[in-house]
Amino acid sequence: MSPGAVDPLTGLMNWRALVFVTRGDPLSVNHLVADGAAGLMLVGGAIAAGLMTVKGWWRPLWRDWLTSLDHKRIGVMYVALALVMMARAIAEAVVMRTQQAAAVGSPGFLDAHHFGELFSTHGTIMIFFVAMPFLTGLMNFVMPLQIGARDVSFPLLNAISLALTAAGAALVMVSLVYGGFSTGGWTGYPPFTGIRYSPGTGVDTWIWSVSLSSIGSTLTGLNFAVTLYKNRAPGMTFFRMPLFSWVTLCVSILMIFAMAPLTVATVMLALDRYAGFHFFTADAGGNMMNYANLFWLFGHPEVYILILPAFGVWSEVISTFSAKQLYGYHSLVAATMVISVLSFTVWLHHFFTMGQSANVNAIFGIATMLIGIPTGVKIYDWLLTMVRGRIRLTVPMLFAIVFMITFLIGGLTGVILANPTIDFVFHNSLFLVAHFHNMLIPGFLFAMIAAVQFWFPKVFGFRLDERLGRISFWLWAVGFYLAFMPLYVLGLMGAMRRTMEWQRPEYLPWLAIALVGALCLLAAFMTFVAQIAVSVRRRDALAVPGGDPWDGLSLEWSLPAPVPEYNFAVLPRVGARDPFMAMKREGRAHLRPEAYEDIRLPKNSPAAPIILAATFLTGFALTWHIWWLAIAGLVACWIPITLRSFREDHERVIPASEVRRQHEAWLDRVAALPAIRREDETGPRNRGRASSQFAGGQP
Amino acid sequence: MSDHASAMADREHRHPGLNLDHTDPEGHASAEPVIFGFWIFLMSDLIVFALLFATYAAMSTQGTGDGPAPAQLFDLRIPLLETLVLLTSSFTLGFVSLANKYEGHPRQAIGWLVVTLVLGAGFLALEYHDFSTLIHEKHAGPQVSGFLSSYFLLTGTHFVHVAAGIAWGMVLIVQQAVLGPTLPVKLRVMRLALFWHMLDIVWIGIFTFVYLSGVLA
Amino acid sequence: MSDQHVTARRPIPDSERIGRRRELRRYIAGFALSLLLTLPAFSLAAAGVLPPAQTRLAVAGLALLQIVVHFRFFLHIDLQKSHRDDLMLILFTGLIIGLMVLGTLWILFDLEGRMLSP
């Protein structure tokens, strides 16, 4: 790639960047895997497009989804994006595990470049395009309902955040077919990712996809924080908010402050690569250690951006399925805040071995161990919530219990790693890989799956199939232990992360177990998808129009399922924590409001999809040095926003009479539903009206 | 609402920048989330600048490589001029805010906004001249050393922000002329004011820690 | 749009005129104060009457004061209760900036001392 080869029209683009063009190499398994993945994506895309055309779904997709500013639909789109990306990242994990198990004393079937791309895309996708959209989607859907709001404060900005994240994801997906990806891992450390050692366009794809996602997350944080500050229902004071809304507030604040360092780091790396700057180069006064510093200034708060939503989910799940109010509400809130602030004080523990003096390491090591305290408080609070509760072991609750045990193990290995002297031994070993998967799979992924089981009826109006849910749960739980416990052992035996070939035969049994575990997790994911598919087919039998299938405590359960576009027919007045529980206890649930008002909702806007296309093209153009297109894309981003600012009719009105008609029809329907007891909760009788445990008396 | 009650409400809900409060109580209410959101964006932006400062502080002493050190490059004449121009633009923007709040007609606001943007453009011209002198005459472009990379990124980011502010201001001039001082336009002017004043605060950091500290050997 | 159009040239009530004058004075005071802080900083650095370390400290102090002046007079942030949310946000931002900047400098200068010096 000589600098002279930049074509003014097409930049560096060339046919040989297409993955199917194998440059005359002999046919190999390595190519088959790469071509197979690319082919799978193309065929999958083609089938999806064909299905859309046959069913005539393009127009509804545009009208009801892509241009919608409804926080609920945006939330669903975020989660859908996360699931698509998760399918790819799990498949990649299985390929890597297979390579490692096959490569004890032999080279295996992948080449080093391909293996490097695999662990880089796996990490990048899991963090930025699975975890972030999943939790953002969930918070998008749930938080406004919990605080009694009609929408987030800035609906268009919300859609734009999704567009930016989706554009970043699209860049990663395109690199599967065209151009390839970085081999520098999800952290992208220079000087390896500098232009001298990574001259291709892979790192550039990583830079722009991550930057887009990072800007999207900053805007999301801003939007949620304002919503939580300014848009709560009357009487919904901060200390009456459900815990999930509290964690949303803390996560938003983390997003506002923690994404900026990542943007700074990626922009500096880009300047090094594109313009010959010397931020992180090995010569001319560059300092690559500042990259590690900046990256983890983002990276550690990011860990808590991922974990805190899970803490919110567990709080809701455990209290609902224990039929009790949360134990230690204030201490849970305080612990969340303490964790949020402490998360800004520990970033150095990701690079204890970089060479700073022992004093620096000691301070950051102690700060790291301190985080164990508020986290411990949370675990005790959840346990004490369960004590003397009437516990129902539904699918989300099963996940919660496995989470607490597994997360505790992960936390303990974390305390081990927080000790700098021990970290020097384990740094970059599979012990570390085991540790963070041990935190993120139960602490993030299990929570998200539990959240889907928990809130799915609220989103779509029908429950998920319980039997497949249980099968999926066991596969997730067993798969996790099989896949990651062996990595602790391997780490202790000295195996390093991101290794594609082993020389020690004693690793083989452990690698084989880990492979079985990875396959288990793949099966778990497929069962999860099957569970959704089967439930969609059985949606009439599983329907819960009453909207309260689990005898819930917070406001979202007082709404119909699916939730009408305006959320609340009449904005609730909140007088206590767990307001819906209070309403049920006092017999005030499902009462007819005295008066209705016209409701103003934002009109649909094509701005977000236009920005999606424009930012994707900008990222692609920057990657391939197509300067005219990059400039055109940047300008195109601002056109819809500027034009829109000259118009003033951004709202449409739903007349009070229409709201009354819909709401009262629903109330009549609820009154006709059977009020079911908790033992029938997962059975066919559950239509979403609870014979509440909270009714009349202490829970 | 009685006068007393509305005065109470004003005192309870105030946001950064010049408040519309009693001249447009309805507008004041809808300003709150919008201004608060923009204020949060500015805080996030401040983090970006803070990290650029930190990087500059490290690289201007550790990262000069074979290139020049700060004391060999900087003198204080142009930075002083830049500072005065930018400060004055912040002051004239105050008149825009006052007109935005008190006048029913956009003429004054437009006039002062034009003055502010011209001063902003003057600042950009001075800074462009500064960059061009460094690169072409002193052979101290951003590719020379880590120190110069961080210098150009820090001041360049501020430059880009000011340029964005000017572009935004020009759109707002058109909007005031076409739409008049409607509430959405007023709110946009208020946000531009916050943005501009915040850039001034960043500039205080730049002239102090880059230029004033830089000329001291 | 027309209904939102504020009627042109409405008579300005006395209370507003007083408010306006007070706010105008605020901008003038802010401008004067910031000039009063900028010019000494530049002259200190240019004249070199103090040793470099003390000059650095002095100009940093003046910058801090000027930042406060800008917040107070241009951004209208003060210590009144009505501004508590915004002030809290600024202080929290200040805390995060402090952690990030001081942490970065501590780490990078410590590394410099241990690894890059001959």
Image (spheres, rainbow, N blue to C red):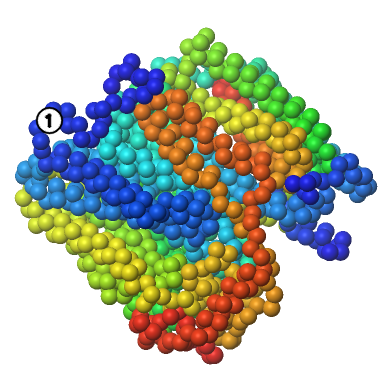
Q: Nearer the viewer, residue A148 or B137?
A: A148
Q: Position of residue B11 (x, y in %)?
A: 78, 57
The residue depicted at 9 percent of the width and 41 percent of the height is A107
Question: Residue farthest to the top?
Answer: B137
Q: From what the image shows, is residue A464 above or below residue C12?
A: below
* In this picture, residue A273 sits left or right of residue C25: left
Q: Position of residue C65 (x, y in %)?
A: 69, 37
* In this picture, residue A140 sits left or right of residue A154: left
Q: Nearer the viewer, residue C44 or C2?
A: C2
Q: From what the image shows, is residue A311 above or below residue A14?
A: below
* Quadrant where the image shows the N terminus of chain A: top left
- The residue that mark 1 highlights is A25
Element under disc 1: loop
Q: Position of residue A571 (x, y in %)?
A: 63, 69
* In this picture, residue A579 sits left or right of residue A284: right
Please state the chain letter of the residue tagged with numbered disc 1 in the rendered image. A
The residue depicted at 21 percent of the width and 62 percent of the height is A523
Q: From what the image shows, is residue A583 above or below residue A642?
A: below
Whether residue B93 appears in this view of the structure is no
The residue depicted at 71 percent of the width and 33 percent of the height is B174
Question: Residue farthest to the bottom?
Answer: A697
Amino acid on which the number 1 mark rests in the picture: Asp
Q: Residues within 10 Å of mark 1 (few under 14, many from 20)?
A: few
Q: From what the image shows, is residue A212 above or below residue A224?
A: above
